[in-house]
Every structure is written in structure tokens, then in C-alpha cells.
Image: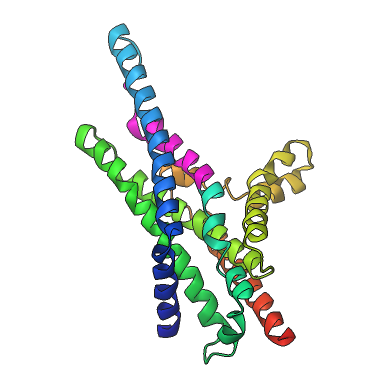
Amino acid sequence: MRNALAIAGKELRSYFASPIGWVICGLFSLIFGWFFYTYVEFFLTQSLRQLAGGTGQPMNINMSLIRPLFSNATVIVLFVLPSITMRTYSEEKRSGTIELLLTSPLTDWEIIVGKFLGAMGLYATMLIATLLYMGVLFAYGQPEWKPLVAGYLGLLLIGGSFISMGLFISSLTKNQIVAGVGTFVAGLMFWIINWASDNASPTVATVLNYLSITQHFDDFAKGVIATDHVIYYLSFIAFGLFLTSKSVDSERWRG
């Protein structure tokens, strides 16, 4: 585990040693902030209308603002995370350092887990930066903190799923652009796979809904942490890392 953490630290430092880490964090925060401003403005407008009309129940800040904000944050994750994982293995192949990595006294799993944790470290940094917006809500409103924790846990899990998928796809090619586009397309497929459930048989519809990566996030956005959703994301991550190990192992045999 020590070797994996050392690789994770090296990967995380490499992100911020180049502009890519700063640009990705800034872009994520900027888009998240735009969604935050939009929903705050909508929430205030609707609240003022209800106050002026003297009708209706007071709007719930968690349901009316935070829940749709987290749901839209998953869209940002879909577009941004491929730019994090596209270089993890493809850059090693392009620069020729993959041979040195594979012949080092490190196991494949130590390398894979290290790269995964490094990418997760950057993603966690992106999420931490958004806590500034949540601080504004607590300063001027009274949101419930438990749904916030559930929402951030869901974002962390769905991001880990995309990262494990991106590691696998990056291990298949030496072209970063191909790895990035491939990760986005694969993520989009798991994003929209349940759309076909409306015209499918009940059994197939159940399978498609279960495979949908966003279907499992809905409860997290509501503030509910369900065991089956957590198991789905952890299984997704484990399977993505398993496929990566097989891809790296095949690279070792070809080398």
C-alpha cells in the first residue's frame, strides 16, 4: 500500500506541475458556480413570489436548490473527468516510460491503485473547492447538512466510476485524445443506457435501469444513502480497475 500511495502522490503532483490540474479545477469550479448562481437566483425568485402572494408552502432549500445542483454537477463530471484520466497510461506509452514502469519492482495493482488514487485526489480537490458555495448557503440560509454529505458522497462515487473506466480506456491506447474521447463515449453510454428501458421488456428494462450510472445517483441527490447504490458504484470501480490490470498485464506480455 505504501508503494501505491507513493505513486498516487507522484501522480497528484504531476497534475499540478502542469497547467492541466489548475485548468481542470478552475473549469469545474467555474461551471459549478454558474449552476449554483442559476439555482440560487431561481430559488430566491420563487420564494419572493410565494411571499408576495401569501400562498403555498415555504420552499425547501435542499430539495429546490441543492438536489438539482448536484444532479447537474454529474453532467460536469461526465465532461471533465476524461481530461484527467486520458493521460494516465497513454502518456506513459507515448513517451516510452511504460517499459520502465512495467519492469520496476512494483506490482501491476500497486501501479493501478496508485494512479487511481492520484486521479481521485485531483477530483476530490475539485469537490473541496465547491464547498465555498455551500458555505454561502449556510451563511445566509438553513440547509440540512446530512443531504449535503450524501450528495458529495454520491459525486465522489460516480467520479470514481468514471475514473476507473478512464484508466482502463487509457491503458488501451497511446493517444491521449483517443483515450479522452473513448472515456467520454463510454461514460455517455452508461449515462443514457436506461433511456431504452421504456420500449424494452420488464426484465430488460430492469437490467438497463440497474446499469445506468445516473439512476443510482438520484437517491444521493435526495440525501439518501442506500446500500445497493453504494455497492453498485464500488463494484463498477473494482471492475474498471480489474479490466485495467488485465490490459496492463497483456501489455507486459507483449513487451
**Figure check: 85 above or below 71:** below
Q: Residue at x 58, y 62 (%)?
A: 86
Q: Horizontal and vertical percent for residue 158?
A: 51, 54
Q: Residue at x 45, y 56 (%)?
A: 156
Q: Would residue 133 appear left or right of 17 to someone viewing this image?
A: left
23 or 120: nearer the eye? 23
220 or 119: nearer the eye? 119
Q: Horizontal and vertical percent for residue 164?
A: 57, 64
Q: Is 62 one of the magenta-colored residues?
A: yes
Q: Residue at x 59, y 66 (%)?
A: 167
**Figure check: 161 above or below 138:** below
Magenta span: predominant SS is: helix
55 or 45: nearer the eye? 45
Q: Horizontal and vertical percent for residue 94?
A: 63, 72
Q: Is residue 142 visible?
A: yes
Q: Residue at x 44, y 84 (%)?
A: 3
Q: Looking at the figure, which quarter contains the N terminus?
A: bottom left
Q: Is residue 57 visible?
A: no
Q: Would residue 75 appear left or right of 253 to someone viewing this image?
A: left
Q: Would residue 150 appear left or right of 237 to someone viewing this image?
A: left
Q: Looking at the figure, which quarter contains the C terminus?
A: bottom right
Q: Is 97 one of the magenta-colored residues?
A: no
**Figure check: 172 above or below 194:** below
Q: Quadrant of residue 201?
A: top right
Q: Horizontal and vertical percent for residue 139?
A: 20, 37
Which stretch is magenta? 58-76
User: Which residue is at the far left?
Assistant: 139
